[in-house]
Amino acid sequence: MLDTETTGLEPEEGHRIIEIGCVELVDRRLTGNNFHQYLQPDREIDQGAVGVHGITNELLRDKPRFGDIAQDFIDYIRDAELIIHNAPFDLGFLSHELGLWRKEPPRIEDLCRVTDTLAMARSLHPGQRNSLDALCKRYAVDNSQRDLHGALLDAEILADVYLALTGGQASLFAAIQGQEVGGLVPEQVRRLSGERLPLRVVRASDDELAAHRARLVAINQESEGGCLWLRIDRA
């Protein structure tokens, strides 16, 4: 998971990266192998940008420049899959920084795969707000510490959002590969065999159906139209 903070919005206008934050997921689990670096941009930070992330030139005065950490960053992301929210923004800045570092720099896309969670969210939730904050609200991801943007914090939040976007918990079939599932190892999982008895069907009462419908409407309002069950009922 990667996020950056910058001095402004456009690298073509000379804006630079001032923070890179990455957290690593392996088998859908955080490993703690993070990459985090503040950077000296050699230019003033736009006041509008300071209002977003709270990073000032004073904070960055003694920090390294991108060229000082470029190789470490490349080694960190090589052969990985980069998960980025609004990937074109961050990739544009990273490509710009690499171009300032070397005349023939490596391309991020040649070093690793890139997945854009904004594009993924727009596909899943067309016509809805799909900012990181909106997705946190939709998927009940805690972002209460996010008063200001920060690359490492946003990368950590993005990890939770990505897991929600792609199905939440790891597959129950992980036991096939020898992993524990629900506290059980494969040898402890007992499969039922033989003839099954007929299942008893209990029908919902009118009051229960009405309560169910009211709950779906409340979920739909809270999720900004994202209640799948309500859509199925209407269909």
Image (cartoon, rainbow, N blue to C red):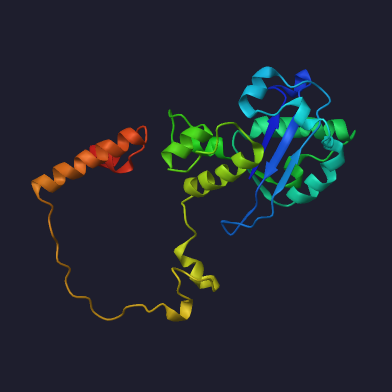
Q: Residue at x 9, y 50 (%)?
A: 205
Q: Residue at x 53, y 46 (%)?
A: 162
Above or below, 80 against 93 in this view is below
Q: Quadrant of the N terminus?
A: top right
Residue 197 place in picture, x, y as percent: 18, 75
Q: Could you tell whether 42 is left or right of 59 in the image?
A: right
Q: Residue at x 83, y 42 (%)?
A: 69
Above or below, 29 against 134 in this view is below
Residue 215 place in picture, x, y as percent: 24, 41
Q: Is residue 159 visible?
A: yes
Q: Is residue 124 visible?
A: no
Tell which of 218 and 116 is nearer to you: 218
Tell which of 143 and 200 is nearer to you: 143
Residue 18 place in picture, x, y as percent: 75, 32
Q: Could you tell whether 77 is left or right of 172 in the image?
A: right
User: Which of the 4 quarters of the picture holds residue 151?
Assistant: top right
Tell which of 31 and 52 is nearer to you: 52
Q: Residue at x 26, y 40 (%)?
A: 216
> Residue placed farthest to the right in the image?
103
